[in-house]
Image (tube, coloured by chain):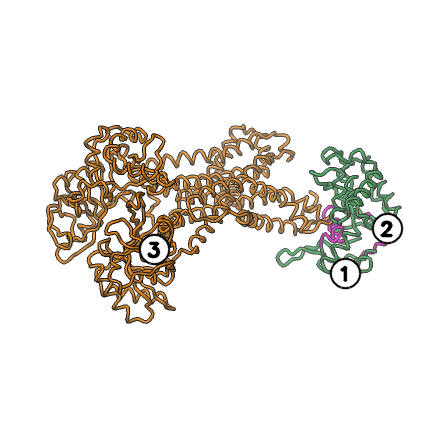
Chain colours: A green, B orange
Amino acid sequence: MIKLEQLFKWYSQGNNRSFVLKDINLSIEAGDFVSIMGPSGSGKSTLLNVIGMLDEPNEGKYYFMGEDVLAMKTKKRNQLFQAHMGYVFQSYHLIDELTVYENIETPLIYKNLSSADRKAIVSDLLDRFHIVGKKDLFPAQLSGGQQQIVGIARALAGSPKVLLADEPTGNLNSKQGEEIMELFTQLNKDGVTIIQVTHSEKNAAYGHRILEMLDGQIK
Amino acid sequence: MLSHIKSRIPRLLRSPISWVQLIGFAVAIATATILYLTAMFELSFDSFHTNKERIGLLYMRSEERGAIISNSSMAPPLAPLVSKELPEVEASTRVLNAQMMLRHGDKEIASELKYVDASFLKIFSFPMDQGNETALDNQDGLVINEAMAESLFGSKQVLGKAVELNINGNWESRIITGVSSVNPRNSSISFSSLMRFEQSPNYKELENDWSYKNHAVYVKLKAQSIDAAGFQKATVAFINQHEKVAIEKLKRDGAKADANGAYLSLRILPLKDVHLSDIGKGEVETSKFPWILLVISGLILFIAGSNFVNLSLASAMTRIKEIGTRKTIGGSTFQLFMQFWMESAFICVLSLLLGLALASLLLPEYNATLNYQFKIAQLFSSLNISLFLAAFLLLTIITGGYPALRMANVNIINSLKGKSSVKSTYLQNSLTVLQFSIAMILCIATVIISYQLHYLSNRPLGFNKTEVISIPIGQGIDANLAIERMRNTLAAYPWVKSVSASDINLGRGRDGSTSTSRFGFDQDGTEIVTNYLTIDYDYLKTLGIKLLAGRDFDRQHKTDENAVLINKEMADLLGGPEKALNSTLEMDNNPTIVGIVDNFHFHDLKREVGPLTMGLPIGGFDLSYIFVRIHSSNLQQSLKQVEDTWKSINPKASIAASYLDENTQNLYNNDRRIAKIVIAGASVAIAISCLGLFALTLLLINGKIKEIGIRKVLGSSITNIILLLSKNFLMLIGLAFLISTPIAWLLMTRWLEAFAFRIAIQWWMFALAGGIALGFAMLTVAWQTFKAARVNPASTLKEN
């Protein structure tokens, strides 16, 4: 499903190039659950951003569902990724002024879904994650774990094939972290491909596969 | 405290917000300064007279045929009787406008002469270089001003020297008994020479004539100030006694009495209002022009000030952490307040300096366009300095102090966590709405004024103003002779179609004068008041005026010397065109009406076309303006050729010829001046409002960078984000539009009422003005939001 070939990313500092990603070759099949580990600055997040096309590599090939992503026009690429990817962040990134319900609804609005369709999907997600009672609360009124659950619910609203999570449990205590991981496992069983970046060995173990990164390279 | 400012200066100057505050404020100060100078100049008219509180101009008021008529022209016997019989009056002087040729050696110069009474120099305080206020005590006294002395003698020391005057074509010698300084620019009475009223032409015959009214009368009251209503009451008996005949006529013709039951009342206009008042049509009203200027400059300062507050508050949000830190290390609320206030004050002082520099850069251009002579140095009078200082201090305290107080008061813990924001959305929004309301009112005014002026210059006037040159004949040449010679010489040019003349110009020519000649006579038992125009042969042909019935004057008809043409309005007064044609008017010489012409606008469009009678110059008034109709593809060159011809006929001609198109435009110079200032004010107001909007957008975006990132990741398009960020601003501007529309409608309806011929206010004018304001606002917001929307979310969503 995802295939990276000889991928490089660097920043130019004068005449020197400082590499963030160096010769990445990676293949991830549909239904996989991958954990990326490594020390700070090893390029984990950058790799995740490149996979999610929030960031572009300087060199290399990226095939997503068999298509050459870097050769596509921006508009088409955005459409492709918005339809198939969901993002979960360490600090949740919920919109403070919107309620739980509205936060989950936002991506659907951008997909131009009718309000009835949106309502059905959001209600379904609220149900599934047991947060129906919290739908009218604002993010500031929720605990960190609850906020992350809303963040995941939002990421899943567009029914993506791939879920990208950058330290989803980084701001949570261990109990909350476990809950999120259980949730990921369940989602993976339901067929969602998951790629997560994490510092925690324990959480990494939930994945089928662990990638260790050091200095921009996969060991 | 000072060290704090010192260390802050580089940071302040690096922040774009400070620059927006600085430039916005500086532009506002420059504009306000210039408008203030103008307003103060207009308000300062005649204030240099020591007795200004006690001096007033007399005028008569009556109401005839539903029209209120105010008239400041008085009859010669009035002024002496006013001094003699009214105990309220200490002194009075007649002031008659005239022109006089002065000669010394081979130098011959036309001077602006006022025939006045001996008390003139005692009532007013015109500064004298030589001689004193007794200079006119003798009948043959002559005062000239120093500029005239310089031109005639090459020296100002001319007291007691002889100069020749051209009186009725003869040169007579007079001794100069006084030299005055050049009139201050803010004097409503201007002269370059003064003579006794008794020396005016035909004085002996007119001395006791109550029907011949041609001069103004100023009085100095005994009381320390002028009580206009009291004066009017005190003069009732006086007027009833001396103007008995006029009052009887008014009663007979169905005139209306005023609130006190008087058909004709003598009233007084305080000297300070003379310059700004228009006596002639309607009640005497003092122009609000200087106050409009002060209000506009106040509004602009307000916009800039509220901008300043808004931006300070908004940028405070980015400094919450700094405030918290400062408090934890022991800064008291007062110390913090002082710091922030000094930062604001620093920017205010910079703005003031920059603003004054800008004003002095703009002044030469402003002076040239609007014919003023302002200098920035004029600001440094004690009154202006104290006013400015007070206004400036108040502004700094409000604009700097309020946000400083708000910032200094925030809760420490919250601010350290970066949670507390100085919430002032309500205040910010109200200020933004107010700013844009003001800007939009000015915008709507701009649209309506421009459209009205456009309408005035394009409305058919009843005569063909294009390709007609008007030449003021001026003094020093026999008018009839001059016209004959012009006719004969110009006949050689094939492009000259016809030549004519009249005693009153159409529009306002290069001599800057407009006048009206009206008189009344009894026709079949009622008084008919008509405007009178002395015209030459070919007048209708030259000006393209339509003849409705009868015929034009014809050189073949010898009897035309005692015939008149009238306009349609006059014919209607006489009972319709059929009845009027070929009947005689019961005025002097009983002329016959030989033709009726269509109405044409011999006045400006503020007035309806009145009744008009036109006669040949025999026994009437002298002709003063030559009209030449041409047909040419090069108007500039033709004008020059006509002018050259005129110069060869009258080498002393000093006033340039002009096209009638230009003359009719000149009638609205005052309105155009208001228009220019309103347009400038509107532009500045919009510019400053948009500057504020620009900075607010910047701050809004700063606060929402993460949200924009999230939304992009969630699939929002760039358009969606721009819309999201500008939605709030759009609503505010929409609200401002709703507020400004009715206010602008009211104001502009009142302004338009001054014109007899005016446009109807239409919805598209509001839409256009709103559109302009909205357009500029959107341009300001859109570019910023567009940039923000394009940022790569990966960079804004970075953890830590």
Chain name for mark 1: A
Q: Amino acid at mark 3?
A: Leu
Task: Name the residue rendered at 56%, 41% in the picture.
Answer: B736
Image coordinates of residue A81 in percent, x first then y, are 77, 53
Q: Is residue B776 visible?
A: no
* Residue B608 is a magenta residue: no
Image coordinates of residue B634 in percent, x first then y, are 37, 68
Badge 1 is on which residue?
A61
Report the side of B61 relative to B400 (left or right). left
Callout 2: SS: loop
Image coordinates of residue B373 in percent, x first then y, are 32, 48
Chain name for mark 3: B
Callout 3: SS: loop
For marks 1 and 2, the one nearer the N-term is: 2
Badge 3 is on which residue?
B581
Gap in angstroms between the C-alphas marked 3 and 1? 101 Å
Callout 1: SS: strand
Gap in angstroms between the C-alphas marked 1 and 2? 21 Å
Q: Amino acid at mark 1?
A: Lys
User: Residue A32 got which mark?
Assistant: 2
Residues drawn in magenta: A26-55
Label 2: how many Cα within 10 Å (few below 14, some 14–19, many 20+): some
Gap in angstroms between the C-alphas marked 3 and 2? 109 Å
Q: Amino acid at mark 2?
A: Asp
Image coordinates of residue B88 in percent, x first then y, are 24, 29
